[in-house]
Amino acid sequence: MRQVKIKKALVMAAIILLLMIPIFGLPFSIQPGDSATVVHGSNPPRVSVLQAKQVINVKIHIVSGSNITAANITDWLKLAGDVLSSFSFNVTAVNNHTSYNQSANVPNVLNIWAVPAKSWGHGNISGINGEEIQLPPGDCTNIHIKNSTLAHEIGHKFGLVHNMTDPNNIMHPDNQGAPPKSCHRTGTNLTEEQRAQARNSTAARAHGAHDMGSGTSQWDAHKDVPHDFIDLSFAEVWATDQNIYLTFTVDNFIAGAERLGFYLETDNDPTTGDPYEGLDYYAGFDPAYEHVIFERYDEDWVPLDPTGITYDFALAWHDADLPPIIVGVHLTLPIAMLERKAGDLLSFRATGEYDGCVDRLPDEGLSNILYVPEEVPAHDIAITNVSPSTTSVRQGESLNIDVTVANLGDFDETFDVIVYANTTEIGTQTIISLSSGDSTTLTFPWNTTGFALGEYTISAYANPALGETNIDNNEYINGTVRIIRRGGFGC
């Protein structure tokens, strides 16, 4: 009897579930990192993906004596993802160290260090420098690390500056005064404008470029040259279809008589440019005069007009009301300024140069990224089909030939289309202002009076537009038409 009741209950539950489907809809899945809005009352439900989070890879470094654990940092990363909303942070590795060692930093990821004291600036206050965040515990008296500190530094990473007016804002500096004292930040809010700024920042796009293969970052060995101000620390290069973005930082940024920048091999041809590596361009910065340097190799390095290349300083930030420290320069080089470019690979080397002393990154050879050439607007007309209405016609009778024409370029075009039987012109029609991306079909009547009996190859040709370079698709040959004797079959 008990088993019968259980079976009845299961049947009723199944019926109720089936009845609920029209109300609540069928199951659905959202990819990790996505968020969705479900509209009930439909079957299946309508799912609108609001925003997929950008994944930022992280490596955690724990130094002995920091009293900060990997579990602490993982929790703080979750808070940072919640506050910034557009990012999620994926921990790829956790390493333990006896002391801070910059050479342990991994390229193309955010390196987070738990350290007893920061290695630059105010040692007890957390800070970010390029792709590296250092988190000290504080002095345990006036300065204390908070669960919001890491989110604050990651905000700087994605272009957010200090908010000095709202203590509830995550970008409000926590350590203020002389001497500094903590407890000035009381919340973890961000405005929608700040979130949008972080989401669209150059740093966010750089991480996306790394993931797509069109960007890379590198760290350089510390103190491998005698001069701190040309001792390269970090370099990053990434490209879009419009610009090449170049970043370098140095151990100690001094406005001295040196130059810091990048040699570029842009055309995948070692026979052009500076032997033996085929270096084509140099884009750099002169700290003494704060101006951009742009050169091309034409049997020797020749100065070019740098107008169009923009720069801004790379900054290291503290979680304090202290001014940021200039540590390097970001250069934005429009690809259109490169006359010598080809292929899909950009090779480069960062250098610091002073009085015969050179620091190279990499030390040997060149680094590479996928290179996206500039997409230049183009003229491109194409014949995509030719179709005679019949393959056999009596001499003196008529048939139609349909010709389909497409505008594959970026401009509206006016041009002539000509149809041939063998090499004899059948007719010409003018297409006026065919819009970019559109196609149209023209019909050409062919009266075969005066044409000899036999077989004719049918083709169409579009006269090239002014500036059109791809003319291989301007001609289309398709089909044959046989002209036969009137009143009979065959020739």
Image (cartoon, rainbow, N blue to C red):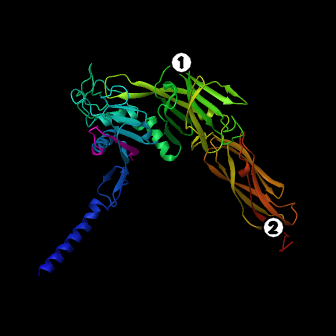
Relative vertical location of residue 75 with respect to residue 360 in this rendering, above or below: below
The label on residue 142 is none
Amino acid type of the residue that numbered disc 1 sits on in the rendered structure = Ala
The label on residue 288 is 1
Relative vertical location of residue 222 with respect to residue 180 in this rendering, above or below: below
Residue at numbered disc 2: 482
* Magenta stretch in the rendered image: 52-71
Mark 2 Cα shell of 10 Å, populated few (<14), some (14-19), many (≥20):
some
Write the residue at 40% across / 36% down: 132
Image quadrant of residue 362?
top right
**Looking at the image, is mark 2 or mark 1 earlier in the sequence?**
1
Q: Is 218 one of the magenta-colored residues?
A: no
Q: Locate residue 211 relative to residue 274 in the image: left or right.
A: left
Position in image of residue 159 (x %, y %): 40, 32
Q: Is 53 one of the magenta-colored residues?
A: yes
Q: Which secondary structure, mark 1?
A: loop
Amino acid type of the residue that numbered disc 2 sits on in the rendered structure = Arg
Mark 1 Cα shell of 10 Å, populated few (<14), some (14-19), many (≥20):
few
Q: Nearer the viewer, residue 410 or 270?
A: 270
Relative vertical location of residue 276 with respect to residue 301 in this rendering, above or below: below
Q: Locate residue 333 relative to residue 468 in the image: left or right.
A: left
> Is residue 167 shown to the viewer in this render?
yes
Position in image of residue 85 (x %, y %): 34, 41
Image quadrant of residue 26?
bottom left
